[in-house]
Amino acid sequence: MSAVVVARGLTKNWGATRALDGADFEISRGVTGLVGANGAGKTTLLGMVLGLHRPDAGTIEVLGHDPWTFGPSVRARVGYAPEHDALPPDMSAHDVVRHLAEVHGLPRRAATERASDVLFEVGLGEERFRQVGTFSTGQRQRVKLAQAIAHDPELVLLDEPTNGLDPVQREEMLHLIGRVGHALGIDVVLSSHLLEEVERVSDAVVILDAGRVVASGRLNQLRAGTEDELVVSLDDGSAAAVVARLQERGVAAVAEGDTVIVALEAPVVYDLVRDALADSGAALRRMAPRTSSLEDVFLAAGHAE
Amino acid sequence: MTTPVPLAGGRIHEGGYRHYDGPRLGPGAAVRSLFRQTLQRVMGLRRPARTKALPFLSVIIAYLPAITFVGLVALIPGRLDFVPGYARYYGFITAAILLFVTFAAPEALCPDRRSRVLSLYLASPLTRTTYMLAKAAAVASVLLLVTLGPPLVLLIGLSLQGAGPDGVLGVVSVLARIAGSGVAMAAFYTSVSLAVASLTDRRAFASGGTLLLITGSGVVAGVVVNALRLSDGFFLLNVNVPPLELVARIYGKPGVIPDVPTAVVAAAVAAYTVAGLALTWWRYQRLQVTR
């Protein structure tokens, strides 16, 4: 899978503050979550992807080019929706999107047609000729997304796109982002401090902490290393008996209420658990490997540092 | 692109996302688009009616004297004594020019920073420099509408009635002076007003600041020359003096500070223009939009 963004030892200082500290990562096709607390360096990193800041050290390549050297041509292929409000309130949504598509290199006629198309895509087809200033926060977030994809970019950078949205609007926005990244085939970098929403739509993550990349990769790979326990949920208070049977067979297990946590050291453990359940006559409700959330990965990465 | 779907007696267009495989224009197109959008913004086009009032009022004030003089010449043939010279004409339209100066640059620059749409422009093929280029060109074009257009109307109107300059050479000579004067004034006021507007993201402050600079510098120049008894050259501190004085010299008139050499006046206009543009460029190079 080809990398869309490659950074090696990327460092950026703002005065005495080190915003990025030797960041190493690759962003591949699909939706990638850029995760970190506020101030972790996410927005600085997006600025460097756009070629707006020169690295103090290290290198970054975006779509095969150095964005600082080839800024205009890289930015023509990239869409960007910033975290903050960034739309002129006294222009219609259609005029804003059309104009920004033109600025990104589309001829006027194509920009006009595509402005309508993308506004329909984000669910603002009927409202597209209304002034942006009359829109709700959720609608303005959609206009920001629309202008970011209107010129059909190869990569789109979304900085905290669910900021200020209520749960329903947030759900709809995440659905749209997933559609952009998966159905429309535009690679997405989704910057967010909300792990749960990144986990919902992302294929991969880059986790930043105080300017350093503490973990990066495909989500399933990051979680894989933590799937080393089997969670066995029981219904009838027989957890202690099951644990005893397992220990007789040399399997490490502990009871937590009606749940038995079993060390998943080898595939044969599944057979041994089955036998222990049968021998003790326990009523099984559910059995599955323990899968860690992105939060677990984030915490583990933070602690590892 | 929308895909036409055949339908009996007509067709419908399916709204929604399509990939684009047509031509992509370069940074030049980005500059042109921003230039056009800024022109529209300053003139209030594609915007509510109230935003059109000030620019169109300025245009009317600027062109009305020229149209009136041309009309009077047509009504009273042979009488030209009430028609001012081209250099003096600027005195009739100073109000219109200053009105444009105080709102054009603030309208062009401030809303982009206030609404933070600047961060979207700088995430496009535009750079800080090409962004400024488009903005400066748009403001200059709007100002040319009032610094270049009215004298041209006067020249054309009088010439069509046989009351213009003598011969082709005379017309060309006046044309060149009109062009030189109009461009110099537009460049001067574009630069100065952009510099003031680059210091704030509020239009009202930028307009007020420009007005304050225009009036305040007059007071300062007056005090410096009259109270401190310094040379008339210090009248050039009044930001209104250098462009109007240069226009007078272009038309071969002595102006209000005849003892000051024309080269000094031209240098003052150039210095103000370069300093204003440099300050604006410097401000925009240092603006943090994505950090």
Image: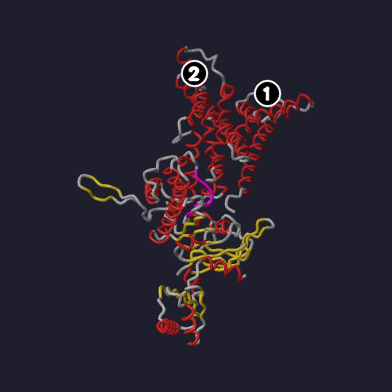
Mark in the foreground, 1 or 2: 2
**Which residue is the site of mark 1?**
B256
Of A268 and B172, which appears nearest the observer? A268
Residue B200: in sight, yes or no? yes
> How many residues crowd around disc 1 within 10 Å: few (fewer than 14), some, or many (20 or more)?
few
In this picture, residue B1 sits left or right of residue B106: left
In this picture, residue B283 sits left or right of residue B147: right
Q: Indicate yes or no whether the magenta region holds residue A83.
A: yes
- Which secondary structure type mostly characterizes the magenta part of the structure? loop
Q: Find residue B68 and name its label.
A: 2
Of A121 and A62, which appears nearest the observer? A121
**Residue A60 drawn at (x, y percent):** 56, 63
- Start and end of the magenta stretch? A79-87
Quadrant location of the C terminus of chain B in the rendered image: bottom right
Compared with A228, A2 (above or below) is above
**Residue A95 drawn at (x, y percent):** 43, 42
**Residue A23 drawn at (x, y percent):** 59, 65
